[in-house]
Image (spheres, rainbow, N blue to C red):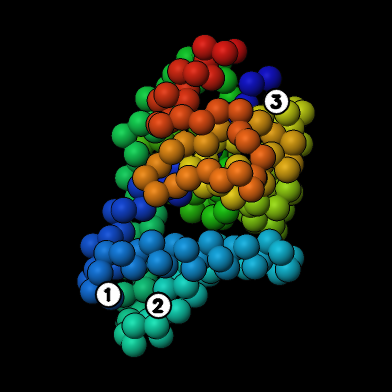
Amino acid sequence: MKVVAFDVNETLLDLAALDPIFNGYFGSPLTRQEWFDETIKAVFVSTITGYYEPFPQLALSSLELLEKRYNKTLSEADRTHFSEATLHLPAHPDAAPALKRLAAAGCVTVALGNNIGSNIEAQLRRAGLWEYLRHIFGSETVQRMKPAKEPYQFVARSLGCAVDEITMVACHPWDIAGARAAGLDAAFIERPGQFLTAAIPSPKYVAPSLTAFAEAYCSAA
């Protein structure tokens, strides 16, 4: 079985769509990346300590942290608007063509995110990618978040395949590290501002786009 698992936020979906919201809240679109960095930091704390808190709550907590940092007070309507906006992210232009190419080659394509499954489904439906993915895996299934081993290994158990039959596709080095530690192959997508370091195991594929990865993967199969 050839299984290709995709990270969701930033790998398939473009978080830059939130920039105008953060500009309106805090006076700079750059605070969107600051918010996401704080959210990922909270994910790592959850992973290390074993204390699970659903991703939507972590995202809101990080937004509240920025409120304190920038001495701003958002209304409940603002926070609700923000949460809803995270479910309406556009797909990167290379996402659908890559998923189509892999599906045509007979690959099992799945999404593996740190968000809860219902939110991932909503995101992918609204971004027009739902039809290309066979399964959705959210963090609530194992009460653990990537880069912990459990989410990656749960995909293998659910699909009845070996972990080394799965290739994890992500633009985050920490996701690549988690996948490799769990026994998966991995593909790193070189999104702007994302770089591999020598501190993590090398992925099998390094590609400038999802379409370039899909072509390389299908050609090697």
* Disc on the earlier residue, 1 or 3: 1
| Residue underneath mark 2 | 66
The three-letter amino acid code for the residue at tag 2 is Leu
What is the secondary structure assignment of the residue under circle 3? helix
* Image point (42%, 24%), residue name: 212
Q: For residue 109, which quarter of the picture?
A: top right
Q: Does 108 sit left or right of 159 as displayed? A: left
- Looking at the image, is 160 positioned above or below residue 191? above
Q: For residue 72, which quarter of the picture?
A: bottom left
| Residue underneath mark 3 | 165
Dots 3, 2 in contact, CB < 8 A:
no
C-alpha span from label 3 to label 2: 41 Å
Please state which of residues 141 and 73 is positioned toward the viewer in this rendering.
73
Question: Quick one: label 3, few (<14), some, or many (20+) residues within 10 Å?
Answer: some
Dots 2, 1 in contact, CB < 8 A:
yes
Q: Does 107 sit left or right of 153 as displayed? A: left
The three-letter amino acid code for the residue at tag 3 is Glu
- Residue 121 is at least partly visible in this image: no
